[in-house]
């Protein structure tokens, strides 16, 4: 599943506008259109759409030519647009964790990961408190999980009961280096869903594997 951000900027024109504004402190439609070689109305429509989705914000400033005419409307990026550009991600995180392990002992990285999942549980607990059933808690959890970058679906069958099927987990490489962190995530799920969670890995096709979280109804 692609991220919502990728779907929001799937048009090449959207990406070009964001890249151009990234290198400025804000630009009016006329300057953007000239810079990109696009029509004024075309750029305006794209900017309006990107503003509605939260990637741009606009404000007005007096025109330079002695304040003649209506104030000019400028667009600039919002904080929501920042993750669309290259970030220091998993590689940097793993480098930091390894350095911390060398400096403070090999158990320190997993201690930090344990604290990370504790903090996440406390944050997400507020969103799940009012859920009345396991299925509702599960649905809210998956929604929060996907907003954090995961991709998963919920299944319910008479034979296997309720389960979450994981398609993508942004922590996968961290789990490969620090296997204990996967257990911390499992414990967090059990605390949030208020049920036992069993992990099961199943083959998909000839070489693929998929992780299932089997939930025990209480």
Image (cartoon, rainbow, N blue to C red):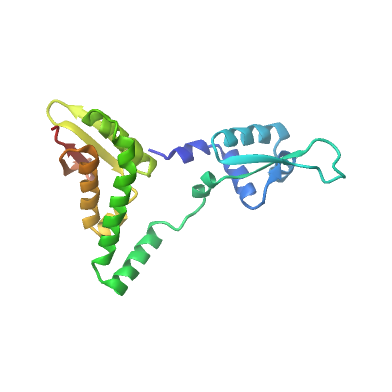
Please indicate, yes or no, whether residue 70 appears anywhere in the rendered image.
yes
Classify residue 12 as left or right of residue 162.
right
Q: Is residue 203 above or below residue 95?
A: above
Position of 21 relative to 10 (above/below): below
Depth check, front residue: 64 or 126? 126
Q: Nearer the viewer, residue 206 or 182?
A: 182
The N terminus sits in image quarter: top left
What is the tally of numbered marks visible in this picture? 0
On the rendered image, what quadrant is the C terminus found in?
top left
**Residue at 54%, 47% in the rendered image:** 79
On the image, the x and y values in percent for residue 180 come to: 21, 57
Task: Residue 132: give x, y in percent of width and height.
Answer: 25, 28
Q: Residue at x 39, y 40 (%)?
A: 147
Q: Nearer the viewer, residue 176 or 208?
A: 176
Residue drawn at x 82%, y 46% as measured from the top left: 64
Q: Is residue 37 visible?
A: no
Asked where in the image residue 202 lies, by quadrant, the reply is top left
Q: Residue 210 in the image: x percent, y percent?
A: 23, 43
Instruction: Identify the residue at image location x=27%, y=41%.
Output: 166
């Amino acid at each position: 599943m692609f991220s919502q951000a990728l779907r929001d900027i799937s048009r090449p024109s959207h990406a070009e506008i964001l890249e151009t504004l990234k290198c400025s402190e804000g630009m009016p439609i006329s300057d953007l259109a000239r810079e990109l070689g696009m029509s004024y109305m075309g750029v305006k429509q794209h900017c309006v759409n990107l503003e509605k989705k939260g990637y741009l914000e606009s404000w007005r400033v007096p025109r330079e030519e002695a304040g003649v005419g209506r104030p000019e409307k400028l667009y600039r990026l919002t904080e929501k647009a920042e993750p669309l550009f290259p970030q220091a991600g998993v590689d940097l995180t793993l480098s930091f964790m390894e350095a911390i392990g060398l400096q403070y002992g090999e158990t320190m990285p997993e201690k930090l990961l344990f604290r990370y999942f504790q903090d996440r549980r406390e944050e997400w607990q507020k969103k799940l408190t009012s859920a009345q059933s396991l299925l509702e808690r599960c649905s809210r959890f998956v929604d929060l999980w996907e907003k954090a970058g995961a991709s998963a679906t919920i299944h319910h069958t008479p034979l296997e009961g309720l389960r979450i099927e994981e398609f993508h987990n942004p922590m996968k490489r961290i789990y490969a280096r620090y296997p204990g962190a996967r257990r911390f995530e499992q414990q967090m799920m059990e605390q949030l869903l208020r049920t036992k969670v069993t992990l099961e890995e199943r083959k998909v096709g000839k070489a693929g594997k998929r992780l299932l979280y089997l939930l025990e109804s209480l």
